[in-house]
Image (cartoon, rainbow, N blue to C red):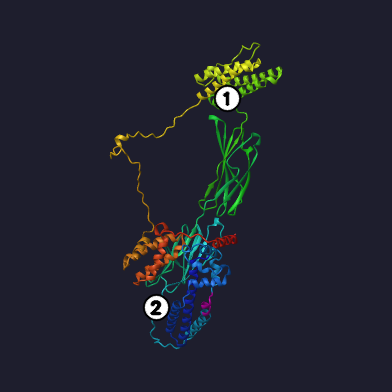
Amino acid sequence: MITMAGLTGLARTLRLERTAGYTLLGVGGGALYGGLIGSPVPLAVGLLSGVAVALAADRFQPLSAAQVAGHLDRVFPELEESATLLLQDPVALRGLGRVQQQRIAARLDLDRARATLPHRDLRRALLLGLPMLALGGALFRAGAPVATNPGRRAAPLPAAPAIRRVSVAVRPPRYTGRAARQLDAMDLEVEEGSVVQWQVEAAGSVAGAWLAGATGSSLPLQHRGGTHWIGEATAFRSELFRVNLTGPDSTRIQSTDFRLAVRPDRPPTITLLEPTGRRSIAPDSIGPLPLVAQVEDDYGIDRVTLNLTIASGQGEAVRFRRLQLALAVKLRGPRQTLRDRMDLQKFGLGPGDELYFFLETTDRREPTPNHSRSETVFLTVRDSTSPVSSDLARMALGAQPEYFRSQRQLIIDTERLLADSAGLARPRFRDRANDLGIDQGLLRLRYGQFLGEEHEEESSHLDEVHQHDVAENATLLGATVKEKLRAALAAMWQSELHLRTGDPRGSLPYQNQALDLIKQIQQDARVYVQRVGFEPPPIEVAQIRLTGKLVGVESRWISHRTTTHDSLIGVRAVLALLDRPGGHRPELAAALETAGRELAALAADSPGLLPVLGEVRQLSDSLHHGAACRSCRLRVARGLWQVIPDSESRPVPQETPPSPLEVRFRVLLQDAAR
């Protein structure tokens, strides 16, 4: 992905190549002339001349990021002549500009862009400068006349240290399955736990080298012969680094900040797709149960285990068994679907047993793997042989509505029979009345169960009844409810007697009496619970109102003090000093140092802050050297205001509603992206 920092880096690469080319041409010309006259002085003069020409070229013919963007537009048609949008701040763009910036940033990576850079200056310098340098060295070694005094040799001056090239070797952890790689980029993104080796190729006289972290960490570099310095460390967190070199005379140079971003190893995720939730199966359905789960991890799964808990028995005799089974997995991709079967018969499940199980997975992270688990599934085997528990009080309350409707239906059917009696034959009339009597008897027996009358055995005489229990000891109903229930049963008995003897009209008063008693029982069995809440004491309006007395009045406000840590103290101090007219150079320099450390800590995870950090350090360097950079102050202020959260810095401008043409264009862009 191409970013604003990437375009700036490409432009910087071209400027360095041009500087190196002019310097090489100057050195080659000076070496050739010095070889001809036998003096090393022209070599130094050529070096200075090449550097001067390079500086002049940078001043009068600068190579900017905008020129690089124009070059990319000419080389890559897929950028749609919009590469210059990458040089603008995304916050300042609105509407289509921001959408187009995101689209072209995703179409090209930095390596492809770097491969198309024109390297004419460097090639020209190599073709001309290297032959001149080689020829001058050959002439000088051949013993050309020396213009200086041969009896006195001047001591060579040590060259200033410089950084030629920085390369990085990354060895990811073995469990990730990623291959080692060699990179020339300064900004890195590596796997957590990777071994990173920095290889610095220096120039000049170097007495020491090290990497300095923005948070105070340091990594010394070891000298490996010649101009090579090597350092190695294991990456566990993101950090900003700088390459530091020192010369024999304590001369010190620093590189720009480069970012080491560490990608953490996320824990795996496992989702149980089948079965889920709660399930109830019949005893004859115990058998293989399909098991489907979706597992996802960065670098693959190490193992998946099935954890089961089986509960058997009832009451205090419940027994628990715990099992753990390893499932065979061969997962190497980041996302896979696991399919298996559980044989429930092997677990010894029986009627009334319950099974709880979940899946647990671990990844291949070393030395401590990450793990996660799925949701728990509940499986119950129905027990059709166990008796249904009964609560007499609950049965009475729950069954009353059904019996209430049945008694009313008997009254309705009796009234209909009386209305149809004129058109019915006498035998048909007696049969229908007898059927109603049978229904009335069944209803009476059902209500009789609540008084302990489990069943009745009728003998040859209707008045001989044999009861197997005592009513007063076989029910949980209150005394008042018992009396009304006995009266209702007596009324039902009289209603049944008249119906069976063919006198439905005489049974109606008893049926209405039974219905009325049942309704009273229903009201008596209801439980009323008083709603309890806060009831404020009554206010004596005449004694308290408008008196101004607050005795006994307590505040309901609860106050507490919280302290928050401000991580941008230096940034705010710099903005406050830049807004003041005048100097304040010592205070501003100290505030810039603090702001630089704060931005470095944030830029490790937000690479977009690197340009702002560079501006802050450039202004700090100018203050230390005694030069006041007015344009630097403006750029630093503009960049730091973007770091401050929007809620603290400035109000967010309201976006105007898009035009119909803009909406249509946006839809077409989204369709093309899909």
Of the residues under marks 1 and 2, which one precedes in the sequence?
A: 2
Does 596 lie within the magenta span? no
Q: Is residue 358 above or below residue 335?
A: above
Residue 522: mark = none
Q: Crowding at label 1, few (<14), some or many (≥20) Cα neighbours within 10 Å? A: some
x, y percent for residue 208: 41, 68
**Which amino acid type is shown beneath numbered disc 1?**
Phe
Q: Is residue 320 above or below residue 512?
A: below
Q: Of residues 177 and 456, which is closer to you in this image?
A: 456
Q: Is residue 26 above or below residue 471?
A: below
Tell me the residue that label 1 is attached to. 404
x, y percent for residue 113: 54, 69
Q: Magenta part of the protein: which range?
A: 118-124
- Look at the image and tell me whether residue 302 can be seen: yes
Q: Of residues 16 and 241, which is closer to you in this image?
A: 16
Q: At 45% from the left edge and 86% from the top edge, which residue is drawn?
A: 38
- Look at the image and tell me whether residue 185 can be seen: no
x, y percent for residue 469: 57, 16
> What main secondary structure does the magenta stretch of the protein show?
helix
**Which amino acid type is shown beneath numbered disc 2?**
Leu
Q: Of residues 267 and 377, which is closer to you in this image?
A: 377
Tell me the residue that label 2 is attached to. 157
